[in-house]
Amino acid sequence: MTPSDGAAAALVVDVLEHHPVIDGHNDLIWHARKHHGYDWDQFDVGGDLSGTGVHTDLTRMRAGGVGAQFWSVYVPSRLTADEILTATFEQIDAVHALVGKYADRMALATGAADVEAAWSTGRIASLLGAEGGHQIGGSLAVLRAMQALGVRYLTLTHNDNVAWADSATDRPALGGLSDFGRQVVAEMNRIGVLVDLSHVSAQVMRQALAISTAPVIFSHSSARAVCPHPRNVPDDVLAGLKVNGGVCMVTFVPWFVTPAVHEWDLATQDAAWSVGIDPRDVSTYQPFAEERALTVPPPRSTVADVVAHLEHVREVAGIEHVGLGGDYDGVEWLPEGLDDVSGYPRLLVALAERGWSREDLAALTCRNTLRVLSDAGCRSTGSAPA
């Protein structure tokens, strides 16, 4: 029996009160760099920024039941090596500054204990994830320095290959991981940094799963069987999470979740290539896609499309291996009903109406991710209590 609309809503309120959402990926920090120079006084995310085009602020995070956020400390791979390193540490610094600015409502977290401590004081836990292996500059020492500053996952690639790993959206160069790539995975396991397999090729996914001694994550990826985008996770890899213990944090990006939007995006990529724009370069492709959307509107993407991915991941990997990674402020538009960070309750109600239990929803929102943080040895700093 599935609950009525009212019962489903009440169930979700109860779940979020005790098991808030831990979201795997949010690009607000890069938005703050591009548009506001990291000026948190001028870019006040403490209030409600609805209607500004920004998807994230503390008011709407509270409304959405978000209790913890992995902030992406992303930088473009097309920068020079020196610029990449500088920008990465500036991104990390910006998260620390953000948490300091709103210390009454936010707390830095580097492990499961910190997350729970933040919740005990009524604050949103802030974790850091670096979105691309290019950000370590081929150096395990840089990786260790990032870990010391609080970074708790590294996405092995972004849209381009790195010298030691193939990307899902680039031409394969290695057939997976190089010997150094395997060293990176081993070092991440050793120091308690989650191996994030979003963005990587399917072969890298398989090889990393085979060698990782700690649970892996997909910080913002969906199911390839539901939508055949190369950024999504094949079923054999999802099944491998049962053995590894990791979690696939399903994303809301429309061209990853809705097959018709994926087809529209493929046509848009072809159009971009024809005028010399590389779709892997977000800085040039995203404005091109937005302009094309004015004359060739993309199809609708909905909450139901995201539900289809969550149900597929649960079916193939198991309820213990599914989570949420919205990618807010990393794309210009989201599925209807999930337009900003306040939308998580709508998604959870839709799942409850399809028979997801309180325990299922709690596993999805945070319990699975908390388990992975603990099992992967992501050490807490003890910085959360006031």
Image (cartoon, rainbow, N blue to C red):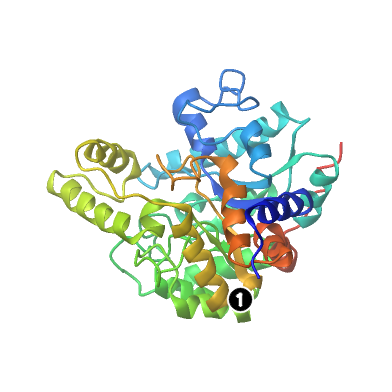
Residue 308 rendering spot, x and y as whole percentages = 47, 65
Total marks placed: 1
Left or right: residue 230 versus residue 127 is left
Compared with 140, 135 (above or below) is above
Residue 266 rendering spot, x and y as whole percentages = 24, 56
Task: Between residue 135 and residue 285, name the one nearer to us.
Answer: 285
Residue 311 rendering spot, x and y as whole percentages = 53, 69
Compared with 286, 25 (above or below) is below
Left or right: residue 214 versus residue 154 is right
Element type at mark 1: loop
The residue beneath circle 1 is 318
Callout 1, which amino acid?
Answer: Gly
Q: Is residue 177 visible?
A: no
Left or right: residue 185 versus residue 170 is right
Quadrant that contains the N terminus = bottom right
Q: Is residue 58 visible?
A: yes
Left or right: residue 17 versus residue 224 is right
Quadrant that contains the C terminus = top right
Task: Between residue 344 and residue 139, name the one nearer to us.
Answer: 344
- Residue extending furthest top? 42
Residue 152 rendering spot, x and y as whole percentages = 64, 54
- Residue extending furthest left? 274
Compared with 142, 237 (above or below) is below
Residue at 31% x, 54% y: name it: 261
Residue at 52% x, 42% y: name it: 88
Density class for disc 1 (Cα within 10 Å; few <14, some 14-19, many ≥20) is some
